């Protein structure tokens, strides 16, 4: 009993240690991306599709090989009116080994193998598409946490100032140094900033919850996000020209590659459909033997005497097929035209997406510059107003207006900062470039 109790204590210790380690673990963006890719159900399904494509390719290549099969049949026959010297019941056994090989089928095997190999490549590109979607989702949630974290820090600082101002004003009001109206304005501002703090805390909790759900973690798991230092260079770096971004995206984007592969697939389907106009040639061969219990010959002799071999060559050509071949070719050509249009549509959508992301990034950069300048101006104005308020030269209304103007400017700067960061990184992902905020 003591030994079991000792073991239980050790196990509990390791369990608590592991839990503490998991809770104290710091999640960087690269770690979030790596973990999300391993946990994504879409990624797992995509890997299954790749394996299935490989199996189909192997099966298509195996069509060049001959087929070989063995068959045997056994029966018992009853003859009620058999002669007296013969048994009424007889047993029959037959054994056959047959082989077949398609010599020619209009190149259908060749085109089928190419289609399956192309499908395998498409499956790999589909994985790249899923990977890009996961990266975009993780990046968005991660940056949202960075924004919410910095916003909470700023709100806490402002709250501390408001709490100190409220405490000071309360003492002055109780001492009769300020009016009830002035104190009420200070108190209202304090209540407002407590509410803003609660909202900022909730925003951070919600942002972390979104990331945890994306990573398929337990919502109750505590995670700590590594906050990299974001410099003005990260936000205000010179963007490449839009045409350059588009050209890079055309080479890197998996959906463009997928569309182009589908065009190649449609061309192979046309060739495969046209192969139906050729005849098919098949080679067949086989050996067989059998025996019957009613025979006067011994089993070995029967097997020898009944042994036979066969070989044959057959040609088949459909003269009239109810328009099946022609319709198949026409459908394949229509599919090719549809694939070409789909490719053009994807390119057009990509151009619109990049245009929008580029304009948003430029707008956010300009907004960040303007907001940052406005924040510094509002900060200087508030400090001056606060000094005059402390000297009695300004009333609470003027001081609070200055503070609210500063809060709004800080909020606008934060929004512009992380909006620009997100759009810049999105453009990098579109171009197949690495994320550069760690």
Image (spheres, helix red, strand yellow):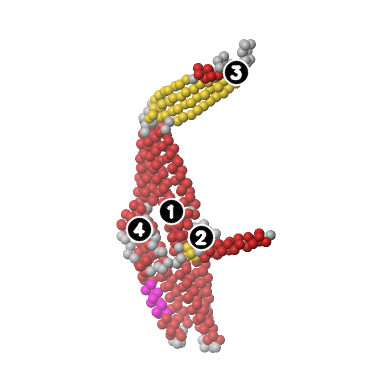
Q: Residue at x 43, y 84 (%)?
A: 387
Q: Is residue 352 visible?
A: no
Q: Is residue 293 above or below residue 378?
A: above
At which x and y percent is residue 44?
A: 48, 50
Q: For the residues carrying marks 2 and 3, which lies nearer the camera in this image?
A: 3
Q: Residues within 10 Å of mark 4 (few under 14, many from 20)?
A: some
Q: Secondary structure at mark 3?
A: strand
The reply, left or right, for residue 67 in relation to residue 79 is left
Mark found first going from the N terminus, 2 or 4: 2
Q: CA distance from mark 1 to mark 4?
A: 22 Å
Q: CA distance from mark 1 to mark 3?
A: 69 Å
Mark found first going from the N terminus, 1 or 3: 3
Q: Residue at x 47, y 23 (%)?
A: 287
Q: Is residue 91 above or below residue 1?
A: above
Residue tagged 4:
355
Q: Residues within 10 Å of mark 2 (few under 14, many from 20)?
A: many
Q: Secondary structure at mark 2?
A: helix
- The disc label shown at residue 90, or none: 3
Please report the bounds of the magenta region as a residue range.
372-382
- The disc label shown at residue 183, or none: none
The reply, left or right, for residue 32 in relation to residue 231 is right
- The disc label shown at residue 212, or none: 2
At which x and y percent is residue 72?
A: 53, 25
Q: Secondary structure at mark 4?
A: helix
Q: CA distance from mark 4 to mark 3?
A: 86 Å
**Which quarter of the figure is the C terminus placed in?**
bottom left
Disc 1 and disc 2 in contact, CB within 8 angstroms: no
At which x and y percent is residue 35?
A: 47, 57
**Which quarter of the figure is the N terminus placed in?**
bottom right
At which x and y percent is residue 113?
A: 39, 38
């Amino acid at each position: 009993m003591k030994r079991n109790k000792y073991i239980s204590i050790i196990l509990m210790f390791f369990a608590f240690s592991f839990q503490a380690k998991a809770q104290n673990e710091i999640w960087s963006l690269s770690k979030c991306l790596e973990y999300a890719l391993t946990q994504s159900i879409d990624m797992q399904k995509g890997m299954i599709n790749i394996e299935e494509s490989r199996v189909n390719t192997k099966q298509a290549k195996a069509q060049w090989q001959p087929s070989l099969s063995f068959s045997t049949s056994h029966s018992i026959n009853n003859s009620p009116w058999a002669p007296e010297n013969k048994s009424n019941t007889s047993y029959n056994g037959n054994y056959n080994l047959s082989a077949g090989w398609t010599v020619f089928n209009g190149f259908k095997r060749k085109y089928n193998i190419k289609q399956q190999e192309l499908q395998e490549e498409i499956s790999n590109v589909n994985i790249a598409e899923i990977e890009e979607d996961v990266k975009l989702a993780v990046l968005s949630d991660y940056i949202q946490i960075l924004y919410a974290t910095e916003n909470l820090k700023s709100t806490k600082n402002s709250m501390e100032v408001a709490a100190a101002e409220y405490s000071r004003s309360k003492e002055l009001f109780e001492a009769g140094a300020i009016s009830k109206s002035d104190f009420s304005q200070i108190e209202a501002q304090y209540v407002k900033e407590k509410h803003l703090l609660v909202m900022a805390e909730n925003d951070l909790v919600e942002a972390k919850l979104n990331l945890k759900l994306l990573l398929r973690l337990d919502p109750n798991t505590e995670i700590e996000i590594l906050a990299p230092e974001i410099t003005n260079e990260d936000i205000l770096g010179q963007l490449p020209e839009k045409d350059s971004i588009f050209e890079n995206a055309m080479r890197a984007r998996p959906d463009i590659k997928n569309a182009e592969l589908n065009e190649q697939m449609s061309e192979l389907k046309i060739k495969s459909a046209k192969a139906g106009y050729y005849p098919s040639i098949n080679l067949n061969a086989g050996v067989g033997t059998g025996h019957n219990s009613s025979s006067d010959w011994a089993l070995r002799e029967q097997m020898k005497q009944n042994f036979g071999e066969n070989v044959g060559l057959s040609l088949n050509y459909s003269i009239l097929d109810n328009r099946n071949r022609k319709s198949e070719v026409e459908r394949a050509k229509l599919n090719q035209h549809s694939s070409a249009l789909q490719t053009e549509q994807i390119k057009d959508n990509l151009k619109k997406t990049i245009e929008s992301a580029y304009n948003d990034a430029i707008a956010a950069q300009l907004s960040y510059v303007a907001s940052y300048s406005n924040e510094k101006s509002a900060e200087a104005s508030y400090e001056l107003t606060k000094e005059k308020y402390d000297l009695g030269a300004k009333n609470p209304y003027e001081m609070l207006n200055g503070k609210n103007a500063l809060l709004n400017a800080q909020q606008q700067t934060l929004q512009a900062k992380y909006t620009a960061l997100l759009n810049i990184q999105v453009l990098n992902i579109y171009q197949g470039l690495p994320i550069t905020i760690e």
